[in-house]
Amino acid sequence: MSDVRPIRLWYQLLSSETRLRNSIAATQAAADRVAAPGTKVEVRGTSQGALGDQYRLFWHYDVREVVDNGLSVRERGGYDAFVIANSLDPALTELREILDIPVVSFMEVCCYTACTMGERFALIAPNERFIPHYEDIVRSYGIEHRLSSTEAVRFDNIGRFDDVFTDDTVGDELLEQMKEACARAIARGAEVIIPAGPSAAFMVRRRIFEIDGVPILDAYGLIVKAAEAAVAMHRATGVCVSRKRRYQTPPRNLILQCAQVRGIPALRNG
């Protein structure tokens, strides 16, 4: 008999909840569009995130906030999966070490899904500074030979990504740049395209899921369905992560010691 209990997902963006409200709202709409009946997707941003996160220096401050949110979920409970909806995999290893619910990653899900849809895929980055980060991530998955290229959006209004959801003129400008980036990717052999950042929600909003016969992944919707599947399998088997090697959980005595020494309230009970 199937488990029909409701599913509750913590859906973590890096976007600032004050500066990027339109982007967060568009992502919520993209997630809700595909969520199964009974699935509640709670899209969360950060206090000041996605401000220079193409640079590792600033990105690490965002990662700490994502870790804190994950620890809060662990302490309070109530969620069936933690979805990292940012393309840079922030806190992915850290949260898989400590959470006993599925932790689902934007980039992981999109890249491996793309490999089931075509031989080679491309990534569309918000700007050129993201390109080496994305290529490092794909290389860590061991599928760099499936990546045809990573293309940056040449969007003159790079600081106005939030406006593309409310200003049609700015949105049309981004759309043209997305089409050009996709055309470059297709010319370099892409059979599937993964948009990242606000562009992913924007393409869903414009209902563009294919260009010249090449699928454009609905990335934010896809990770909702992947999370639902992960929750279903967790409920069916009781297993959601390997505790050998990479995602081994710290021993309880070390958790308690670090909670005290580092002042981490969410870990005070081990």
Image (cartoon, rainbow, N blue to C red):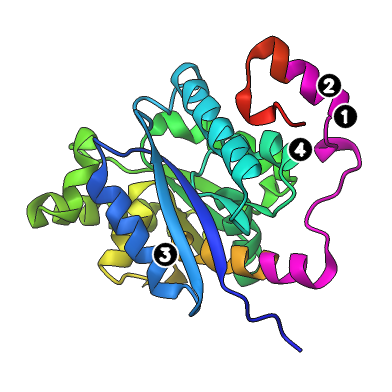
Q: Residue furthest front?
A: 269
Q: Are marks 1 and 2 in contact (CB under 8 Å)?
A: yes
Residue type marked 1: Pro
Q: Are marks 3 and 2 in contact (CB under 8 Å)?
A: no
Q: Are marks 4 and 3 in contact (CB under 8 Å)?
A: no
Magenta residues, start to end: 231-258
Residue type marked 3: Ala
Q: Residue at x 68, y 65 (%)?
A: 231
When asked about the image quadrant of residue 34, the answer is bottom left
The x, y position of residue 57, in whole percent, is: 48, 16
Q: Earlier in the sequence, mark 4 or mark 3?
A: 3
Q: Could you say which disc has been placed on residue 31 in the image?
A: 3
Gap in angstroms between the C-alphas marked 4 and 1: 11 Å
Q: Residue furthest bottom?
A: 1
Q: Label 3's element?
A: helix
Looking at the picture, tell me which residue is in the foreground, 89 or 99: 99
Gap in angstroms between the C-alphas marked 4 and 3: 26 Å
When asked about the image quadrant of residue 45, the answer is top left
Report the predominant secondary structure element of the magenta stretch: helix
Which residue is under mark 4? 97
Q: Closer to the observer: label 2 or label 4?
A: 2
Q: How many other residues sit within 10 Å of disc 3, few (<14), some (14-19) or many (≥20)?
A: many
Which residue is under mark 1? 251
Which residue is under mark 2? 254
The x, y position of residue 4, in whole percent, is: 63, 81
Q: Closer to the observer: label 4 or label 1?
A: 1
Looking at the picture, tell me which residue is in the foreground, 251 or 132: 251
Q: Earlier in the sequence, mark 3 or mark 2?
A: 3
Q: How many other residues sit within 10 Å of disc 2, few (<14), some (14-19) or many (≥20)?
A: few
Q: Residue at x 63, y 21 (%)?
A: 264
